[in-house]
Image (cartoon, rainbow, N blue to C red):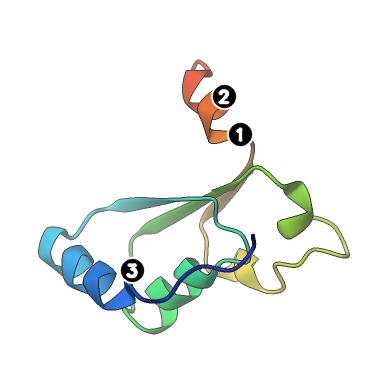
Amino acid sequence: MPESANEHLDWLEVELRACSPEVILDVGMGRGNYGWFLRNVVKWPGKLVGIEVWAPYVVGPDALSGGNRTYYNEIIVADVREWLKAPT
C-alpha cells in the first residue's frame, strides 16, 4: 500500500521534537507521505532516508511516488530485511 495512516502524525511530531534524531529511516516509504509531513509540516532538517521494497512506487516514469524524491536525502529500493544483513 503506497498510502500511510495519518492518525499518529501528532504523536510522531511530538516524539521527533523530543528526541531530535539526526537521521530517520522511513521503512516502507510508499509515496512518501511521512517524508512530505516531516519536511513540510514539522520542518525537520535532518537526514531522511526512505526504503521501499516495491520499486514501482519510487522509480521509473510511471512511479506512484510523484515528487517524493525531493523529501528524502536517499532512497533505497530493497527489502529492509535483506538490506540490514548486507555488509556495509
Residue 79, which numbered label?
1
Question: Label 3, on which residue?
Answer: 45
Q: Is 75 placed above or below 87 here?
A: below
Residue most toward the top? 87
Residue most toward the right? 61
Left or right, residue 41 beside residue 82: left
The location of residue 26, given as percent across then percent down, is 45, 53
Closer to the observer: label 2 or label 3? Answer: 2
Question: Label 2, on which residue?
Answer: 82
- Seen at 33% across and 68% down, the residue is 45
Q: Earlier in the sequence, mark 2 or mark 3?
A: 3
- Seen at 23% across and 71% down, the residue is 11
- Seen at 23% across and 54% down, the residue is 21
Residue 65, which numbered label?
none
Residue 2, picture quadrant: bottom right
Instruction: Label 3: state its secondary structure.
Output: loop
The location of residue 6, given as percent across then percent down, is 42, 76
The location of residue 20, given as percent across then percent down, is 18, 60
Rounded to the nearest angstrom, the CA distance separating label 2 from label 1 is: 5 Å
Q: Amino acid at mark 1?
A: Asp
The location of residue 40, given as percent across then percent down, is 42, 82
Rounded to the nearest angstrom, the CA distance separating label 3 from label 1 is: 26 Å
Q: Earlier in the sequence, mark 3 or mark 1?
A: 3
Instruction: Label 2: state its secondary structure.
Output: helix
Q: Amino acid at mark 2?
A: Glu
- State yes or no: discs 2 and 1 in contact (Cβ < 8 Å): yes
Instruction: Label 1: state its secondary structure.
Output: loop
- Dot 3: few (<14), some (14–19), or many (≥20) neighbours within 10 Å? few
- Seen at 39% across and 56% down, the residue is 47
